[in-house]
Amino acid sequence: MSKIIDTIIGSVEDKKQWRAIEKRAKSLPHDYRIAYNEIKHYLWTSSGITTIDAFRVLIDLFEDSAANGRKVLEITGDDVAAFCDELVKGEKTYFENLRKKLNNNIAKKIGK
């Protein structure tokens, strides 16, 4: 039954972890909070990632860096998009699922 629920609405545990990450993000200093929210938007709209692992890494990095008095752009660099792309490099993406589905559909339809 829980597998059906997870399929329909997503993992309850993932939702709890996401809420915890978001709560931690609200505690970041102002500049870090701005960067986190912009990066979050960029990643959700452009990367196709299917897990929240990158956000765990990001929030840990931002908390540690803020605690050490570093500026957010010292961490991300001026090209924040490149930082984001590197952050999710190697992560499982929705695009991989689409590619796999395309290849399987064509192979199936042409009898391969």
Image (tube, rainbow, N blue to C red):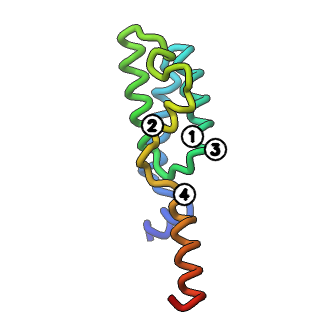
Label pair 4/3, CB-CB below 8 angstroms: no
Q: Residue at 51% across / 69% down in the picture?
A: 100
Marks 3 and 1, how far apart at CA = 6 Å
Marks 2 and 3, how far apart at CA = 15 Å
Tag shown at residue 95 = none
Marks 4 and 1, how far apart at CA = 12 Å
Disc 2: which residue: 87
Q: Secondary structure at mark 4?
A: helix
Amino acid type of the residue that numbered disc 1 sits on in the rendered structure: Leu
Q: Secondary structure at mark 3?
A: helix
Pair 2/3: label in front: 2
Label pair 3/1, CB-CB below 8 angstroms: yes
Marks 2 and 4, how far apart at CA = 16 Å
Tell me where residue 65 sits by quadrant: top left
Marks 1 and 2, how far apart at CA = 9 Å
Relative height, residue 50 to residue 106 (above, below): above
Amino acid type of the residue that numbered disc 3 sits on in the rendered structure: Thr
Amino acid type of the residue that numbered disc 2 sits on in the rendered structure: Leu
Label pair 1/2, CB-CB below 8 angstroms: yes
Label pair 4/1, CB-CB below 8 angstroms: no
Q: Secondary structure at mark 1?
A: helix
Disc 3: which residue: 45
Tag shown at residue 43 = 1
Disc 4: which residue: 94
